[in-house]
Image (cartoon, rainbow, N blue to C red):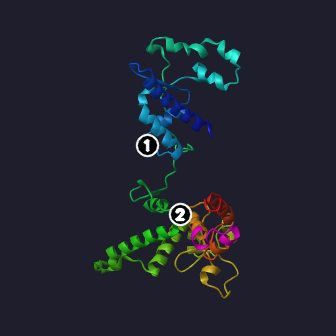
Amino acid sequence: MTIPRLELSAAVVAVKMEQMLRRELKLNVCGSTFWTDSMLVLQYIKNTSKRLHTFAANRVAVIHDGSSVDQWRYVNTDRNPADDASRGLDAHNMISKDRWRKGPEFLWQDEKSWPATPQTPNLLETDREVKKVAVSRATGGAVTADPVARLISKYFSWNHLKKAVAWVLRCKKWLIERRSRSIWSGNRLTAAEMDDAELAVIRYVQRINYEQEIRDLEKGRRSVQRQISIYSLEPIIDDNGVLRLGGRLRQAPVEESRKFPSILPKHHHVSTLIVRHAHDTLLGHSGKEHVLSVVRQQYWIPKARSLIKNILKACVVCK
């Protein structure tokens, strides 16, 4: 566990301890003050604009439920007696210090003499506990969260995602063509609609991750720049605008999707869904090489073995 997470967990312990003391002592407590020597913990507690990962978010919620923001104050490490326990002092040295037995000297003084809490800076976007949000530029220069990225991230099943996109595309078609509502009849999607949805998702992922490569190929260049990560794959663009693996199988007597599988990035939610679908649904929890073989019949994911290994490692059924 990281130091910031340990410090945040310590703040949770402080809140629970305060609640327990109020219950057990049955004293009329006028108020409580919580002290921390971690500015990062104060940033988490005072944060109102950024979404945190589950671990931090759950603990901040406990802190907010049992205390208010203005109850939290900062104490410098040098004036924090609790810090002595983490500095390797033996019991004799700790007991011999008055502040370990009596607490810091400033607590015996008037509240006006307590250490002033410095201005707490805003939580940085680069903090490990802050969730990253995909953004795109809209007309007028405003920055908004990408709705397609949000839609994709909501689903944890490849089939469910394709169905959702297929319904969106059907609605789009109805709005554009102003056709009769009979287009909705049956409430069932056709195989062609599911194929179109899959194509739309693949194109979106590629445009986000391989924008420069696609632009080069669409301009008529025979290959992408050598420094591009997928240069060795000899990528091509098909008639549907899909980036595919090139190679020497042009005359092979197999389906086009097997000769020229679609290229997808390893670190994308869609790639994870596709591998998980092959492992869980199509193959009934088969091994790494079998899953890789099936995935590569339609998709080429660089360093796919590593992705498949991680997914199989997390599979509850396979453990």
Tag 2: residue type? Ile
Asked if residue 286 is among those painted magenta in the image, a careful observer would answer yes
Q: Front-most of 250 and 287?
A: 287
Percent x, y of residue 227: 68, 63
For the residue carrying disc 1, how many other residues have a C-alpha within 10 Å: few (<14), some (14-19), or many (20+)?
Answer: few
Between label 1 and label 2, give the one nearer the viewer.
1
Q: CA distance from mark 1 to mark 2?
A: 26 Å
Tag shown at residue 49: 1
Q: Which mark is residue 208?
A: 2
Q: Is residue 173 left or right of residue 46?
A: left
Q: Which residue does the image show at 64% across and 70% down from the upper left?
A: 224
Q: Which residues are magenta?
A: 280-291
Pick whichever, 216 or 58, lies toward us: 58
Is residue 142 placed above or below 191 in the rendered structure?
Answer: above
Q: Quadrant of residue 274?
A: bottom right
Question: Where does residue 4 sit, x and y in percent of width and height?
Answer: 58, 37
Q: Is residue 90 above or below residue 132?
A: above
**The magenta stretch spans residue 64:** no
Where is residue 100 shown, x and y percent of the image?
61, 16
Q: Amino acid at mark 1?
A: Ser
Label 2 crowd (10 A; few <14 / some 14-19 / many >=20): few
